[in-house]
Amino acid sequence: MSRRLWLAVTITLSALATPAFAGDADCSYMEIAATNDKAASIDGDLKPLEKKLKKPPFTAWNTFKKLSGGSASLAKLKSESLQLKQGAASILLRDRTEKRVELTVTMDNAEGKRTLEAKPAFKAGDWLLLVGTNAKDDGHILALTCK
């Protein structure tokens, strides 16, 4: 066979062996209440986030309680609503590679007021923590991970 034919066969075989990346994302989320109490504590369900919760800006609070959680399958540029105990949130997948996820995230408080609008980009499989503002000094945190 000629060199060109070998090159064409090699390129075709390598393309067949490497699956195309779909660009969709499977995400999990946790809604977290952050407060200051006399006795510091972190809910056992938040174990994967413990290191992040012990670093600024989360050191403003010493007690973290999981309020809700779930999962969402995201298609590119299609918004998905998240079921929260204190308000509402939505996430939209802007872009996705094997290593990186880019989202648009909004969060509203229980009164319907927008408390967070962000366009984060983060490492696929890592946890992203976003804080919505609150009238009190308490925190309302949305933790997301996408693969």
Image (tube, helix red, strand yellow):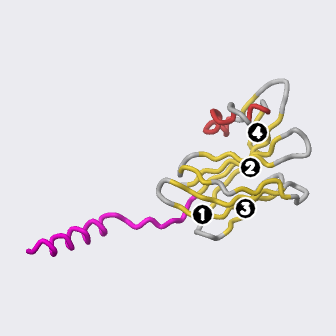
Q: Which mark sits nearer the N-terminus, 3 or 1?
A: 1
Cα distance between the residues tagged 4 and 2? 9 Å
Q: Which residue is mark 3?
A: 90
Q: Are marks 4 and 2 in contact (CB under 8 Å)?
A: no
Q: Is residue 8 magenta?
A: yes
On the image, the x and y values in percent for residue 89 come to 76, 59
Callout 4: helix, strand or loop?
Answer: strand
Q: Nearer the viewer, mark 2 or mark 1?
A: 1
Mark sitting on residue 118: none
Q: Nearer the viewer, mark 2 or mark 3?
A: 3
What amino acid does circle 4 point to? Lys
Q: Nearer the viewer, mark 3 or mark 1?
A: 3
Q: Which residue is mark 2?
A: 68
Q: Which residue is mark 1?
A: 73
Quarter of the figure with residue 65: top right
What amino acid does circle 3 point to? Ser
Quarter of the figure with residue 87: bottom right
Q: Are marks 4 and 3 in contact (CB under 8 Å)?
A: no
Give the residue drawn at x 61%, y 64%: 93
Q: How many residues crowd around disc 3 within 10 Å: few (fewer than 14), some, or many (20 or more)?
A: some
Callout 3: helix, strand or loop?
Answer: strand
Callout 1: helix, strand or loop?
Answer: strand
Cα distance between the residues tagged 3 and 1? 12 Å
Q: Which mark sits nearer the N-terminus, 2 or 1?
A: 2
What amino acid does circle 2 point to? Ser
Cα distance between the residues tagged 2 and 1? 17 Å
On the image, the x and y values in percent for residue 130 come to 72, 47
Q: Are marks 2 and 1 in contact (CB under 8 Å)?
A: no
Q: Which residue is mark 4?
A: 65
Give the residue drawn at x 74%, y 42%: 66
Classify residue 19 as left or right of residue 97.
Answer: left
Magenta-highlighted residues: 1-26
